[in-house]
Amino acid sequence: MTLLDFPHYSAAMEAELKTLEDKLTQFVEVNQRLRDDTQRLRQELASALHRNKQLEDKIQTASSQLEVLVQQIPAEET
C-alpha cells in the first residue's frame, strides 16, 4: 500500500484524532467497569433473593410451629 499525501492533514487534526482516541479508550474502560459492576450486582441480587427466600421459609416454618403450640394450650375456663 502506498502512503498517500494528505495536504489538509495537519497537526491540529492529529491532535483531534489523538483526543478522540483517548476518549474512546476511556469510554471502553468505563464501559467494561460498568459491565463488571453490573455482573457483580446481579450476582449479589441473586444471592440476596436466595437468602430472602430461605428466611421466608424459616419464618413460615416457625409460624406453623407456633400455631400448633398455641392450639395445644388449654382454653381458660371462666
Image (cartoon, rainbow, N blue to C red):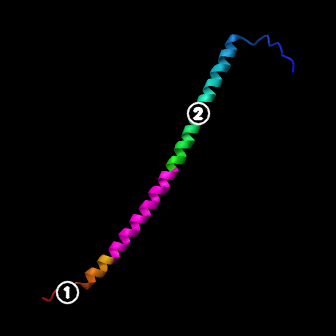
- Left or right: 45, with 67 as reference point: right
- Left or right: 12, with 49 as reference point: right
Please, what secondary structure does the residue beneath circle 1 have? Answer: loop
Q: Is residue 28 above or below residue 76?
A: above
Residue 14: in magenta span: no
Q: Position of residue 73 (x, y in %)?
A: 22, 84
Q: Nearer the viewer, mark 2 or mark 1?
A: 2
Residue 68 picture quarter: bottom left
- Density class for disc 1 (Cα within 10 Å; few <14, some 14-19, many ≥20) is few
- Mark found first going from the N terminus, 2 or 1: 2
Q: Position of residue 35 (x, y in %)?
A: 57, 42
Q: Amino acid at mark 1?
A: Ala
At 47% from the left edge and 51% from the top edge, which residue is drawn? 44
At 33% from the left edge and 72% from the top edge, which residue is drawn? 62
Quadrant containing the N terminus is top right
From which residue to which does the magenta span run? 42-64
Farthest residue, direction left: 78
Label 2, on which residue? 29
- Density class for disc 2 (Cα within 10 Å; few <14, some 14-19, many ≥20) is few
Label 1, on which residue? 75
At 44% from the left edge and 56% from the top edge, which residue is drawn? 48
Q: Amino acid at mark 2?
A: Glu
